[in-house]
């Protein structure tokens, strides 16, 4: 009987201690949203950041792909956003994604730049709770003037 109680205490006690701990520091996800004004598919010197763009952080179960967590954010005047996440999402796949752009001339999400994966767990060796998402972008409806010359410069460096 004593062994059963000891075994039970060894199994249950760690779980109780972990549950009674105060919440860990929240995660802070930071990123930016831009307008690809040259339709290059990447950021250039003519790229402009978008204030007021809406982004969403979604975490899905790794096995079932069921949505477990969702939170929206908005970019500030510099095109940067910050989303605070209180929970650890160790066994989930989390992505930031574009929702909408306030600019009528730049509303189409750029293929391959419309989402950014973030890891939201403390069990990966990172000390900081700040997570940086890759920049995400919308495509301009029309390329701005000077883009042809700029993209030509990029081609000269490739040769």
Image (tube, rainbow, N blue to C red):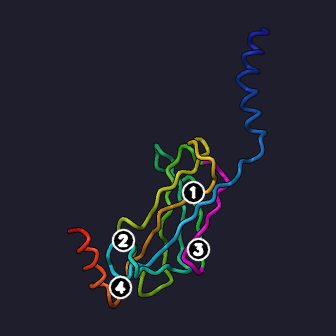
Q: Is label 1 or label 3 in front?
A: 1
**Up-down relation of residue 107 to residue 96 (above or below):** below
Give the residue pinned by disc 3.
74
Which of marks 4 and 2 precedes in the sequence? 2
Q: Residues within 10 Å of mark 3 (few under 14, many from 20)?
A: many
What's the magenta region? 77-88
Q: Residue at x 75, y 10 (%)?
A: 3
Answer whether labels 1 and 2 touch (C-beta < 8 Å): no
Q: Calculate the distance from the C-alpha at mark 2 to the C-alpha at mark 4.
A: 15 Å
Q: Residue at x 40, y 82 (%)?
A: 46
Answer whether labels 2 and 4 touch (C-beta < 8 Å): no
Residue 19, percent from left and from top: 74, 38
Q: Calculate the distance from the C-alpha at mark 1 to the C-alpha at mark 3.
A: 17 Å
Q: Is label 2 or label 4 in front?
A: 2
Give the residue pinned by disc 2.
42
Which of marks 3 and 4 precedes in the sequence? 3
Q: Is label 4 or label 1 in front?
A: 1
Query: Judging from the image, what secondary structure is the residue with disc 3 in?
Result: strand
Q: In which quadrant will I find the C terminus?
A: bottom left
Which of marks 3 and 2 precedes in the sequence? 2
User: Which label belongs to residue 131?
Assistant: 1
Query: Judging from the image, what secondary structure is the residue with disc 2 in?
Result: loop
């Amino acid at each position: 009987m004593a062994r059963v109680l000891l075994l039970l205490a060894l199994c249950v006690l760690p779980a109780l201690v972990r549950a009674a701990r105060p919440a860990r520091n929240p995660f802070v996800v930071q990123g930016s949203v831009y307008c690809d004004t040259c339709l290059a598919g990447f950021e250039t010197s003519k790229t402009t950041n978008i204030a007021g763009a809406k982004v969403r952080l979604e975490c899905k179960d790794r096995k079932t792909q069921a949505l477990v967590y969702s939170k929206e954010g908005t970019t500030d005047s510099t095109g940067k956003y910050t989303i605070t996440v209180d929970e650890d999402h160790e066994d989930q796949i989390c992505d930031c994604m574009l929702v909408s752009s306030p600019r009528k001339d730049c509303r189409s999400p750029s293929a391959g730049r419309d989402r950014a994966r973030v890891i939201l767990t403390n069990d990966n060796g990172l000390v900081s709770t700040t997570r940086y998402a890759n920049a995400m972008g919308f495509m301009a409806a029309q390329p701005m003037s000077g883009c042809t010359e700029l993209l030509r410069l990029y081609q000269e460096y490739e040769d």
